[in-house]
Image (tube, coloured by chain):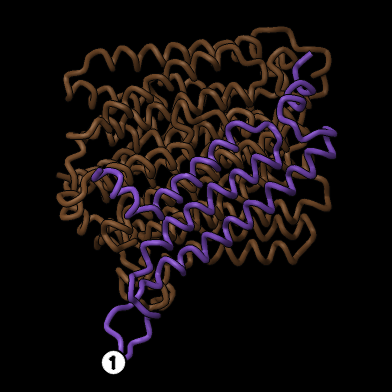
Amino acid sequence: MTALTTLIEHYNYVVTIFLMMTGLYIVVARGNMVKKLVGLSIFQTSVYLLYIEPGKIIGGTAPIIDPAFGVYSNPLPHVLILTAIVVGVATLALGLALVVRINEAYGTIEEDEIFEKDREP
Amino acid sequence: MKAIAAHLPALQVIIPLLGALLAAFLRRGTTAFALTLVVSWIMPFVAGAMLWQVLSTGPISYHLGGWEPPWGIEYRVDALNGFVLLLVSAVGAVIVPFAYRSVALEIPEDRRAWFYCMHLLCLAGLLGIAVTGDAFNAFVFLEISSLSTYVLIALGPDRRALVAAFQYLIMGTIGATFYVVGVGLLYLVTGSLNMVDIAARLAPAWAENSRAVITALAFVTVGVSLKLALFPLHVWLPNAYAYAPSWTTAFLSATATKVAIYLLIRFFFSVFGVAIDLATLPVAGIMIALSLAAMLIASFVAVFQTNLKRMLAYSSIGQIGYITLGIGLANQAGLTGGLVHVANHAMMKAAMFLALGAAFLRAGTVTLGELAGLGRRMPLTMTVFTIAGFGLIGTPGTAGFISKWYLAVGALDKGWWILVFLIVASSLIALVYVGRVLEVVWLHQPAPALVAASDPPLSMLLPLLVFGAATIWFGFDTEWTAGVAATSVKTLLAAGR
């Protein structure tokens, strides 16, 4: 029972880890390069959640000092993740650009077909 | 002068970063090259001045924007990263003249300025990882260097370069994301991102919640190991090195994996090792087992490669095994051996990849069978290749011998005789794959296609000769490699428990 209660109390982490594994699974299991990038994005996004969730403190308010409030949420994770989102967007953009070039060069974006075309004669 | 001296750690990153921006605006390949040359040649002076200051007066702590650590980002330079910074910037400087002809051959004119822009971005990222004392900042620099590396690889002349870059992008991003997960967990348990501060706060966190700390350690280790191509996380490396432009391969093999190794050492000995007795965890055992696998299996695979760039790539994975073996041994001699090999392998591999770049310029190929008798056509180039090859094997009188000597002493200090035999066995495999090339290049009759081949122009020959000379020089004079490495190892091991 205790294991179940821990699970329910930390359901946000369960969601995060589920997303993380989903993303990683797609990257490993799919041969289509665009789908791989989709998986990679889900994987990265789950990490944003991992950072943001603990920053929220129940009953906490925005970190602007005011005598009316005593509990503040942590703003730092948001700032960090803003940076991580930029990195994620850049990675996705570069990945998609590469896929476009690969499609021009090979006429396909399926990994096994590309390896087939490159096999040394 | 004094005003500049106070900001050296920031300049180490800002100069190449602004240089990259400028290169993007210049648009012309030749001017962008001149800019790269100037920027790259400033960096070793900055790094050298910092290392000199560190060795004479102790670690430098630079507060970015004037914000006090641990709240602000701190750039922290001690003997360890001063050494890495000087290595990366020195290699980056020596290697630049080679680019002029090599890039002109392999990169179309309209992309050359962008190529140099990406190169400087990569340099800024690598130096940033080495200079920063903030775990999250290191992630940002890791991604700056990685994203520019993907572009550099994709600019390779073969269409397979695109696929290699894509595969590296997937693996590299997974690695970086693992690293961020690890840093996030560390932040959760310690509430800090400053490496020194994390180390100080980790001991109570370890007592309270050891599972989270172990998970963080695992994520950071796997993430960084992907970047440094620790066996079996190396699969991105052979294709990336084989199909990238020749000059980029030489630069990456000498710097990119080395900086990742620095980050791993930093986390093991200055962050986790300070608070936790790592000997109670199976970290060293895993590192040593994987290092041995790299030294033997990857080197063995290298023997069967016909594309010489790919052969050297597999050899790099094997050589990285020596470095991680030193990390696994974690005693004075062993870790010194690993660190020295960071520098020694950088110059040997740079020399060999540059020699192949020169061969590609003259012969148009790096396939072993088509390079018969090349030594008689390009004697200086192939002499440097031979010297560096002997370095890889670990012949006495070359830099490679020094690293292996320290590693063997480190293994003996632990009483592990078997490791010494395995180091020798791995050297023998290196003898096979280097010897195989030397035989074809020196002893075979020159192929008719190579009649017109000759040593490359001076701009390409000079960097080659410098690295070749360094391989011999640092085989005798070890003050600047082993000496500085031993100093930094002493500090690292003293900080740990």
Q: In percent of the image, x 79 and y 19: which residue is there?
A: B450
Percent coordinates x, y for residue A48 in the rendering: 48, 57
Give the side of residue B344 with respect to residue B19, left or right: left
Q: Which chain is brown?
A: B
Tell me: residue B18, above or below residue B408: below
Residue B337, image quadrant? top left
Residue A57, image quadrant? bottom left
Q: Which chain is purple?
A: A
Q: Tag 1, which secondary structure?
A: loop
Percent coordinates x, y for residue B272 in the rendering: 25, 47
Subunit of label 1: A
Mark 1 Cα-neighbour bin, 10 Å: few <14, some 14–19, many ≥20: few
Q: Is residue B86 visible?
A: no
Residue situated furthest bottom in the rendering: A67
Residue situated furthest front in the rendering: A1
Tell me: residue B326, above or below residue B152: above
Q: Amino acid at mark 1?
A: Pro
Q: In percent of the image, x 73 and y 38: which residue is there?
A: B162
Towards the viewer: B215 or B322: B215
Q: Is residue B431 visible?
A: yes
The residue tagged 1 is: A67
Tell me: residue A110, above or below residue A116: below
Total marks shown come to 1
Percent coordinates x, y for residue A114 in the rendering: 76, 27
Q: In percent of the image, x 21 and y 54: which residue is there?
A: B202
Percent coordinates x, y for residue B447 in the rendering: 78, 12
The N terminus of chain B sits in image quarter: bottom left
Q: In percent of the image, x 20 and y 43: which residue is there?
A: B493
The C terminus of chain B sits in image quarter: top left
